[in-house]
Amino acid sequence: MNALLLTALLATAHTNVGGTVALSNGRAAGHAVVWLEGASGAKPLHGVVIDQRDRKFIPHITVVTVGTKVEFPNHDTVFHNVFTEYHSEKFDFGMYARGKSKSQVFDRPGLAVLLCSVHSEMSAYVMCVDTPYYAVADGKGHFSIPDVRPGTYTVHVWHESGETYSKREPVESGAALTLRTHR
Amino acid sequence: MVGLRALVAGTCLAALGAARAQISQETTLESYFTSSRVHQGLYHYLSWGETNVRLSPNVKATVSGLSLGGHNSYDEACVTLEDKDRILRLGRFKTAFGFSTWSDQFYNGFNHIPLERIAPLNATLGLTRDDTGAELTFGGPDLQVQTALVDVSPEPTQIVPKRPDHASLRLQTNRGDLILGGDFLADLAHGAEVYGLDARWTAPRLVMRGELMAGTGSSAAAWGYYIDAMYRIPKLSRTQAVFRTEGLQYGQDNDATPNEPITLLHTVGIRQVVSPNLAVNLNYGWGSGADNRYVTGNGLIGWTLRMMFQLHF
């Protein structure tokens, strides 16, 4: 009975998976997106907002799960024209006044690059994933994914520089991953 | 110098008032080079720089300056206080009037500011100005009101108004993909006015916009308009094809009624954003009434090239 209980506890025990990501040149992959593919149970997020303010998209990098609706309010004193190409589907919000908002549902995994047709320096990224296990690394490349069920996953990394990492590997309790991206 | 001290003092006061200040700073530097019939080869005609210091989510200080034809001046130097529905600007700024922001005028595929914005619309008022004074914005996106009391002819480094004798009102509404605006600027000392209407309409890949502005007064009245179409080309997300048609009409011999032959100018072009730091425009202009000094003097007929270098940090 005790052995059965222990097995059940191990099967349901969740752990934090952390580590660091580095670029191919050895520098920290700041703000890289890390996610574990192969887990079910991802649910759409609520209240995800990418703001336009001071000629910037805030935040610069956002991770959402499939089915998440993202709001794009304009809180700037100038007009922007937000557009992207997302899975060959293009959305173009046009121009809208300060205080207005438009939204988009991200219904398939993949990367969307947000641009503004007025301000060439403005950009942001939305990574849509089909897993509950994901994180955005800090500026030094450190990341932590909470409540991961131990198992074997495909570990993915995407960095704004275009470098990526993808490898299937076991993720054990208390795992500390050291990942290096490549072109 | 007095103005500069006032700006610094205002900024410090704003900073003191901003509880738990989260200060961030953004700077943009731009240089514009052009080539046209007037300026052959690559001619450096304008440099502009702006620093925005966000002292808190509700308080921002802006200082920008420009060097144009060897003359240096402040562009804007103001403190902005804002909450969800209200914005108060104090200092030196471009008063909201039609498409008046730097973004509206320079971040597009056209190599020139519209004629109606270059030329004075009556004896005392034009639309390309920096003002000093106060401007209040309130209301929501369905009806936004912007009203200002300003000095429209400050010295190059003046921040505090000396003669705030011009009153401005702008109303703007956003209905679906259409944004409509109405503008009114009154010279309270001389009894001259400028009226304006503007509209923007956007669809996927396409931006249409236009302004109609008219000046009144005892002499030198003029009116003008322009309509812009900007189309982002499929599969070339950073390439825009643009077309502008515009007109400007004056009164003969400083007449209060615009009755000279209208100057028409048409411009077709393309804008290529090469990188976040470089945008290149190629325009071709033609028209009638091209003897107008604002057309020939600025080399707007025939081919013109403009390169904009930008650093943002």
Image (cartoon, helix red, strand yellow):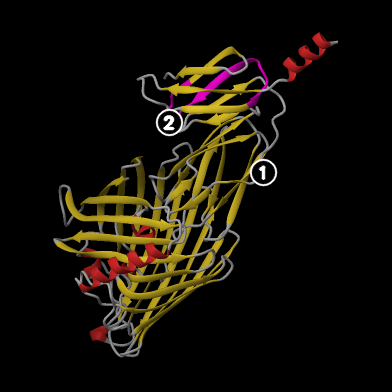
Residues beneath discs 2 and 1 located on the same chain: yes
Image marks 2 and 1: residues in contact by CB distance under 8 Å: no
Q: Is residue B309 above or below residue B267?
A: above
- Look at the picture and state if A85 lies above or below B18: above
Q: Could you tell me residue A183's position as x and y percent? A: 42, 19
Magenta: main secondary structure equals strand
For image coordinates 23% across by 60% down, the residue present is: B66
Give the mark nearest the N terminus, 2 or 1.
Answer: 2
Q: Is residue B213 above or below residue A164?
A: below
Q: CA distance from mark 2 to mark 1?
A: 25 Å
Q: Is residue B31 left or right of residue A139?
A: left
Q: Amino acid at mark 1?
A: His
Camera sees residue B288: no
Instruction: Estimate how packed mark 2 is, as few (under 14), some (14 to 19) or many (20 or more) residues with alpha carbons within 10 Å.
Output: many
In the depicted view, which residue is nearer to us: A53 or B299?
A: A53
Residue A178 is situated, as x and y percent measured from the top left of the image, at: 48, 17
Image position, residue A157 (x, y; %): 51, 23
Which residue is label 1 attached to? A46
- Towards the viewer: B221 or A31: A31
Q: Name, please, the residue furthest toward the right.
A: A1
**Residues rendered magenta in the picture:** A147-164
**In this figure, which residue is indicated by the disc labeled 2?**
A30
Q: Is residue A146 left or right of residue B17?
A: right
Q: Chain of mark 2?
A: A
On the rendered structure, is B35 left or right of B188? left
Nearest to the observer: residue B262 or residue B162 = B162
Instruction: Give percent across and percent down for residue B62.
Output: 33, 61
Q: Amino acid at mark 2?
A: Gly
Any magenta on residue A162?
yes
